[in-house]
Amino acid sequence: MQPARAVPHSLHFTQKLTPEYQAILTPAAAQFIASLVEKFTVRRHALLNKRDMRQRRIDTGETPDFLPETKGIRESNWTVAAIPSALQDRRVEITGPAERKMIINALNSGAKVFMADLEDSMSPTWDGIMDGQVNLRDYADGTLSYTSPEGKSYKLNANIATLIVRPRGWHLAEKHILLDDKPIPGALVDFGLYLFHNAQTLLDRGLGPYFYLPKLESYEEAQLWADVFAYSEHALALPRGTIKATVLIETIVAVFEMDEILYALKDYCVGLNCGRWDYIFSFIKKFHKRSEFVLPERAQVAMTTHFLRSYSLLLIQTCHRRGAFAMGGMSAFIPVKGDEEANAKAFAAVRSDKEREAGDGHDGTWVAHPGLVPVAMEVFDRLMKGKNQVDRQRDETISASDLLAVPKGTITEAGLRNNISVAVQYIASWLAGNGCVPIFNLMEDAATAEISRSQIWQWIYHKAKLTDGREVTLELYEQLLAEELQKIHAQFGTDLPYDRASSLLTTLVASKDFTEFLTLPGYQQID
């Protein structure tokens, strides 16, 4: 181990560097990251400030709508650039953290694409982020393998999925790397290191550096990514358009700017994705102060509700008009071991979800577990005859009122308890370094945990009523939290920091101000 050291442009590491990490954080790679930070951080800060200003307007009554100033983009004819052959068939994608064994199993799963996640399903510990970059480099150069502590060997098959990397969102910093004593954007670390080390290697293999871009809130944020891409291609002597990206539409404000986002990234963007869980969370977050937007409990907010189905159909319509792919979202169900009836219900729910997506015109979908790849694949093989169905056009008129229609439903004590338990269990796991957690037969990541904790805050703030007439109060929450925490301890012991997680959850839901992301205060508690 070597002590932290300075590199060009005053870039400093607050953690010690192992030899493996030194091979990633070379002086040349650090110089490239520093150049990205110096060139684009001011714009990133300005755009995050614009998010805050927009939030204040929504808090005081403004309702999102399609932008009048960009009407010409929406109404003119244009398409995105040509899509490479490696991304033409994306009918089933599997996602998961960029952990070594996970990457191998996912690439071997039979899915067409694996999204290696450095964002919502990964806790951004220093080792997690750096090990992820080591693993991705080994994938690119063909040396990726793994031997378990028990001696079991894992290696890649001859035919594997195409890999796409998801960097962190614009809002997240990397506190372990400082430029002029300030944390730098996590997005630029994740993107920059992967691109610097692997772009040419991937091109030599007939592939390319492919990315998923999370949590954009405006076309201006998409334009920032486009400029990062253009600068990076020039700096690394890559042909224009080498980088390809798919944008996750997972905020309620971005859904009104999908044409504009595609247009800003038209040299690079190959499609949009229905990031449904973050989208639901964003709906709660953006309207957290407005009682007319209180949602029922999570289990009742399904993709068949009007506002979510409208979002899905508009995404398909927008993408196909522009020659881009419309990717479906994640069903959180996973196989249930030891319970045949529950397992059958889970598989049936996934099949139904994928039949809706394929039937509507999506070009592919996400699953959370290798065991569900065959289920989704069978549906898309049956309902989508070609590699994609980008030529299928939809002509619905979908209005702002369709996208903002609050579904009817109820809030039960069981639903409140579920939110509490899921939030505590997930946060505890995240604090311990694991950001992808099976809970109650669903795969939970930061987005689904955000729904749980934000609903609790929303229900307390707006004095929502349970079906039995009781008001959701902080006192009721604290009573149920104590009971759920006791159950968690009885089942799982103290292997994870459940008490610390419950303390963080209480801080979040008891605050009179809504915390934008639970991962922001949570990040201060991890190494």
Image (cartoon, rainbow, N blue to C red):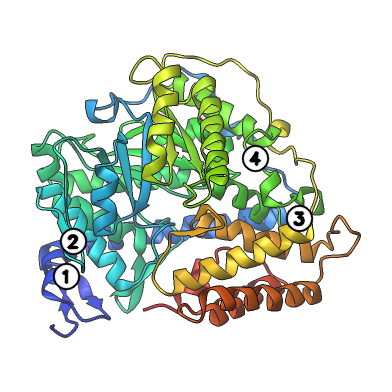
Measure how far apart labels 2 and 4 are at the Cα level.
Answer: 38 Å
Dot in front, 3 or 2: 2
> Between disc 2 and disc 4, whose residue precedes?
2
Expressed as whole percent of the image width and height from the top left, the position of residue 176 reads 31, 75
Q: What residue type is labelled 2?
A: Val
Q: Mark 3 points at which residue?
A: 60
> Between disc 3 and disc 4, whose residue precedes?
3
Q: Name the residue under label 1.
A: 21
> Between disc 3 and disc 1, whose residue precedes?
1
Expressed as whole percent of the image width and height from the top left, the position of residue 210 reads 27, 41
- Compared to residue 151, the image places residue 490 above or below, namely below
Residue 420 falls left or right of residue 226: right
Q: Which amino acid does label 1 sit on?
A: Tyr
Q: Do the residues labelled 2 and 4 touch (CB within 8 Å)?
A: no
Q: What residue type is labelled 4?
A: Ala
Residue 107 falls left or right of residue 56: left
